[in-house]
Image (cartoon, helix red, strand yellow):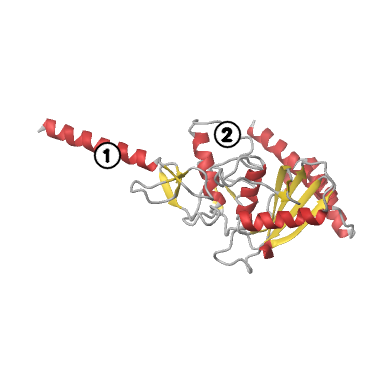
């Protein structure tokens, strides 16, 4: 009887082992590198620890799931955290996602410290204890993509803009109506993606997902499968871009209190506010410097708090 029980247990363990191997098999998915198959060969899915979530390979995978997949192996010590993991003030964290892949408004990162995020998963409030409340997920309606051009050739601005719009609409399936503008200023290129709650349709690609995919592409860590390389072609020639920085603007003002900011950050905010009140129009380059200074100060502040 004992022998029979042991054989049954061994058979069950073998089944679980085979199931695990089947789950680890790669599937072909053009919008998700390293997609996984179900045990019966169906899929594709994104593997989030022990969970599998089905994905539509004709659409971008939600940013929350992508961040979660990236953070799980980091926390288990299986690989080093990539340098390009995430650009925000809190770095890579393991987010809580809704069943459809959107971020939950409150994030705690498996700790008793919690905060509220926007629809792009970026913190927009101070941090508090586990009783911290977030009444809603505030939408990021404007994503600003800043990058540097990596060429010395003289190329007409219109050709660069046309090539970028074509790339964004074809590679990320974002309707052109959400590309609010593309500017070329000397060595910098700026893309404005705008999509508020009232105009976004249920099946439309989210601009926060586009920003994340594009950032990864430019940094050479693509989420889209490698047989579809990221390439910006201008006038029949490859046009290089580098050093992307993504900025997020929400439909409601952020709630990070001034008392938690360093004097340097406060000075930046005051300068921008005074400029707006005085009716001074800042150029994109100057505004970018202020935003970069604020981000730098907040990153330094975060390092001090964590030390």
Above or below, comparing residue 74 to residue 209 in the picture? above
Q: Residue at x 79, y 46 (%)?
A: 266
Give the CA distance from mark 2 to mark 1: 33 Å
Kindly indicate whether the residue at mark 1 contacts the one at mark 2 (C-beta within 8 angstroms).
Answer: no
For label 1, the crowd category at 10 Å Cα-Cα, with few meaning under 14, some 14 to 19 and many 20 or more, is few
Camera-nearest residue between 162 and 196:
162
Q: Which x, y percent locates residue 79? A: 52, 31
Q: Residue at x 85, y 58 (%)?
A: 276
Q: Secondary structure at mark 1?
A: helix
Camera-nearest residue between 226 and 251:
226
Above or below, comparing residue 251 to residue 74 in the picture? below
Viewport quadrant of the N terminus: top left
Q: Is residue 125 visible?
A: no
Q: Which x, y percent locates residue 262? A: 76, 40
Viewed as shown, does residue 12 lie left or right of 108?
A: left
Viewport quadrant of the C terminus: top right
Q: Which x, y percent locates residue 120? A: 61, 52
Q: Secondary structure at mark 2?
A: loop
Q: Is residue 180 visible?
A: yes
Q: Which x, y percent locates residue 197? A: 62, 65
Residue located beneath label 2 in the image: 81
Camera-nearest residue between 156 and 76:
156
Residue located beneath label 1 in the image: 15
Quadrant location of residue 196?
bottom right
Above or below, comparing residue 42 to residue 69 in the picture? below
Viewed as shown, does residue 7 lie left or right of 279?
A: left
């Amino acid at each position: 009887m004992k022998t029979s029980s042991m054989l049954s247990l061994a058979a069950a363990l073998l089944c679980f082992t085979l199931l695990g191997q089947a789950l680890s098999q790669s599937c072909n998915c053009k919008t998700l590198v390293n997609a996984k198959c179900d045990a019966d060969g169906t899929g594709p899915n994104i593997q989030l620890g022990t969970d599998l979530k089905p994905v539509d390979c004709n659409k971008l995978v939600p940013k929350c799931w992508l961040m979660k997949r990236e953070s799980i192996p980091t926390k288990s010590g299986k690989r080093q955290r990539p340098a390009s993991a995430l650009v925000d003030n809190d770095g890579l964290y393991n987010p809580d996602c809704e069943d459809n892949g959107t971020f939950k408004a409150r994030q705690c990162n498996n700790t008793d410290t919690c905060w509220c995020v926007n629809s792009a998963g970026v913190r927009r409030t101070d941090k508090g204890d586990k009783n911290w409340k977030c009444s809603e997920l505030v939408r990021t309606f404007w994503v600003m993509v800043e990058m540097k051009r990596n060429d010395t050739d003289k190329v007409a601005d219109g050709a660069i803009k046309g090539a970028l719009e074509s790339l964004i609409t074809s590679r990320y399936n974002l309707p052109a109506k959400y590309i609010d503008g593309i500017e070329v200023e000397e060595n910098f290129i700026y893309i404005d993606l705008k999509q508020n709650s009232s105009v976004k349709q249920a099946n439309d690609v989210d601009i926060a997902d586009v920003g994340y995919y594009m950032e990864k592409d430019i940094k050479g860590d693509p989420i889209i499968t490698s047989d579809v390389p990221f390439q910006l072609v201008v006038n029949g020639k490859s046009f290089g871009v580098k050093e992307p920085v993504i900025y997020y603007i929400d439909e409601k003002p952020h709630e990070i209190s001034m008392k938690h900011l360093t004097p340097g950050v406060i000075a930046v905010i005051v300068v921008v506010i005074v400029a707006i009140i005085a009716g001074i129009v800042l150029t994109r380059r100057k505004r970018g410097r202020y935003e970069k200074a604020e981000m730098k100060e907040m990153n330094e502040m975060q390092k001090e708090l964590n030390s």
